Image (spheres, rainbow, N blue to C red):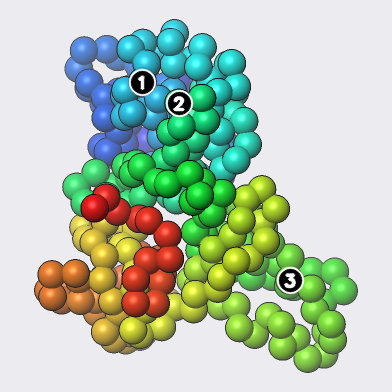
């Protein structure tokens, strides 16, 4: 893929492959603003409204919908038509009772699914890492740029933080960010692949094996998908979505 950083503009030929746009009819395309998701893992809000959902026929129509404050992203009104929309983001247009979740999708990397209104305030997020902050409290850093503070009663014995590990998932309520459920990453859990050639596949973790590489340690997960087929992928490429079934809707059907 061509380099996309630095410039304020983006050529269509250099845009991420999963963007649903015509590549050769026009030269330029909207470039996402800096935000919670990198360019190659997001789509600008305008393209979502016009090209993916199709509720606007032109950029002008899409901008008017966005400028009028009709679009909510993660339960906040977003008026920036370049705002980056990425993994597990919630997009709602209450005026037409439309509620969407952005999910990994086989062959498309990222796409949207319709979700019920009662899920429009529930977001699945992954813990990327955690850091110790003032007074010994623990800050969980999530995949979408959010941070959640875990209060520690005794910094010498931080039992509250020991259960939260990197690559675990949280179901949070928006906009409060209250943790509704914590799903640890382990064998037997249901996951969705968020990157790599198996992106979008869903199944249960059968086994996790760690290896020593030349530069760093890495882990591979063996997953059995919903059709009973087994495959391997890098552990960093999976996101836990539930125990025996997804805790929120992550695929159509």
Does residue 113 lie above or below 200 as drawn? above
Q: Report helix, strand or loop for mark 1.
A: loop
Does residue 33 lie above or below 118 as drawn? above
Callout count: 3
Task: Pinpoint residue 230: horizontal percent, then vertical percent.
Answer: 15, 76
User: 98 or 76, which is in the foreground?
Assistant: 98
Please indicate, yes or no, whether residue 99 appears anywhere in the rendered image: yes
Whole-number angstrom distance, CA of label 1 to CA of label 2: 10 Å
Query: Which-is-in-front pick, marks 1 and 2?
Result: 2
Query: What residue sits 26% from the left and 84% below the top?
Result: 206
Q: Report helix, strand or loop for mark 3.
A: strand
Q: Earlier in the sequence, mark 1 or mark 2?
A: 1
Whole-number angstrom distance, CA of label 1 to CA of label 3: 40 Å
> Picture quarter containing residue 165?
bottom right
Which residue is under mark 2? 96
Which residue is under mark 3? 150
Task: Pinpoint residue 29: horizontal percent, then vertical percent.
Answer: 37, 20
Q: Report helix, strand or loop for mark 2.
A: helix
Query: What residue sits 36% from the left and 42% below the top?
Result: 114
Query: What residue sits 29% from the left and 53% below the top?
Result: 251
> Picture quarter containing residue 23?
top left
Q: Is residue 86 left or right of residue 67?
A: left
| Marking on residue 250 | none
Which residue is under mark 1? 55
Quick one: label 3, few (<14), some, or many (20+) residues within 10 Å?
Answer: some
Q: Earlier in the sequence, mark 2 or mark 3?
A: 2
Query: Which-is-in-front pick, marks 2 and 3?
Result: 2
Task: Pinpoint residue 252: horizontal percent, then vertical percent.
Answer: 27, 50
């Amino acid at each position: 893929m061509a380099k996309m950083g630095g410039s304020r503009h983006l050529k269509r030929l250099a845009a991420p492959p999963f963007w649903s746009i015509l590549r050769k009819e026009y030269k330029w395309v909207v470039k996402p603003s800096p935000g919670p998701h990198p360019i190659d893992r997001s789509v600008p809000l305008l393209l979502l409204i016009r090209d993916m959902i199709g509720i606007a026929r032109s950029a002008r129509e899409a901008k008017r919908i966005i400028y009028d404050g009709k679009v909510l992203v993660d339960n906040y009104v977003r008026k920036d038509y370049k705002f980056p929309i990425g993994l597990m983001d919630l997009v709602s247009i209450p005026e037409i009772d439309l509620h969407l979740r952005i999910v990994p999708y086989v062959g498309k990397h990222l796409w949207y699914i319709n979700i019920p209104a009662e899920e429009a305030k529930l977001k699945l997020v992954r813990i990327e890492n955690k850091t110790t902050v003032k007074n010994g409290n623990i800050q969980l850093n999530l995949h979408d740029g959010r941070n959640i503070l875990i209060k520690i009663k005794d910094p010498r014995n931080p039992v509250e933080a020991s259960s939260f590990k990197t690559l675990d998932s949280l179901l949070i309520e928006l906009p409060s960010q209250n943790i509704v459920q914590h799903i640890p990453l382990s064998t037997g859990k249901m996951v969705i692949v968020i990157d790599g050639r198996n992106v979008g596949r869903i199944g249960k973790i059968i086994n996790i094996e760690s290896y020593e590489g030349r530069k760093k340690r890495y882990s591979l997960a063996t997953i059995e998908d919903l059709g009973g087929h087994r495959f391997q992928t890098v552990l960093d490429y999976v996101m836990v979505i539930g125990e025996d079934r997804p805790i929120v809707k992550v695929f159509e059907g």
